[in-house]
Image: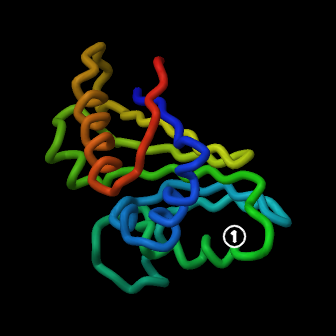
C-alpha cells in the first residue's frame, strides 16, 4: 500500500487536475463522500438504464461524475471534507495481474490537506504483494506524468 500526501502549496494544482482537467477522467469511481453545506454520500454503481449503453461495467467513470461533483463544490467556501474512491476498470486490472480483483486509489481532502492511499483486492488470498507493487508503480508514474508532486509516507 502506497500512502502519500500532497504538499499544501500543491493542493491548488491537484484540485485543478482533479476537477477541471482530464487527468483522472478514465478512472472509475466506487464512491464519493463530500461535506459542504450538507453531507453527500454517493454510491457510484452505474445506472445502465439511464446511460443506455451496452458497455460491461459496474461503476461510473470520473469524466461522467465530475460535472456533478464540481457543481456541489462550487461556491465561496471550500468543502469541509471529501473522499473519492477511484478504481481501475476490470479489463485493465485483469490485463495487469491474474490474481487482482480490483485496484483502488483513495483520495481524501480535509483542512486543506490531501492524502491518498492505494490498495488492491485479490481473487485468491496470497501473501504475495506483487499486485500491490504493480499498482503502486502505475500510480507513481500517473502522478509524475500529470505533474502532481506527492510526498510518500513510510507505511
Q: Residues within 10 Å of mark 1 (few under 14, many from 20)?
A: some
Q: Is residue 75 above or below residue 116?
A: below
Secondary structure beneath dot 1 equals helix
Residue 3 percent coordinates (x, y): 47, 30
Residue 10 percent coordinates (x, y): 53, 50
The structure residue drawn at horizontal position 45% and vertical position 64%, both measured from the top left corner, is 17
**Among the 4 quarters of the image, the one containing residue 126:** top left
The structure residue drawn at horizontal position 23% and vertical position 33%, both measured from the top left corner, is 134
Residue 31 percent coordinates (x, y): 56, 55
The structure residue drawn at horizontal position 58% and vertical position 49%, both measured from the top left corner, is 9
Can you name the residue that lies furthest to the top here?
Answer: 127
Q: Nearer the viewer, residue 53 or 66?
A: 66
Q: Is residue 114 above or below residue 137?
A: below
Which residue corresponds to mark 1?
73
Q: Is residue 80 above or below residue 37?
A: above
Residue 77 horizontal side relative to residue 130, left or right: right
**Screen quadrant of the N terminus:** top left
Amino acid at each position: 500500500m502506497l500512502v502519500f500526501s500532497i504538499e499544501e502549496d500543491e493542493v491548488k494544482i491537484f484540485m485543478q487536475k482533479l476537477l477541471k482537467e482530464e487527468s483522472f477522467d478514465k478512472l472509475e469511481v466506487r464512491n464519493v463522500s463530500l461535506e459542504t453545506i450538507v453531507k453527500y454520500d454517493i454510491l457510484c454503481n452505474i445506472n445502465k438504464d439511464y446511460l443506455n449503453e451496452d458497455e460491461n461495467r459496474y461503476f461510473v467513470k470520473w469524466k461522467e461524475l465530475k460535472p456533478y461533483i464540481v457543481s456541489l463544490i462550487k461556491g465561496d467556501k471550500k468543502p469541509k471534507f471529501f473522499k473519492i474512491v477511484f478504481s481501475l476498470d476490470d479489463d485493465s486490472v485483469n490485463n495487469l495481474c491474474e490474481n487482482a480483483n480490483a485496484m483502488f486509489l483513495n483520495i481524501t481532502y480535509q483542512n486543506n490537506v490531501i492524502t491518498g492511499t492505494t490498495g488492491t483486492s485479490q481473487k485468491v488470498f496470497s501473501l504475495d504483494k506483487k499486485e500491490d507493487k504493480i499498482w503502486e508503480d502505475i500510480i507513481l508514474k500517473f502522478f509524475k506524468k500529470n505533474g502532481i508532486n506527492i510526498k510518500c509516507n513510510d507505511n
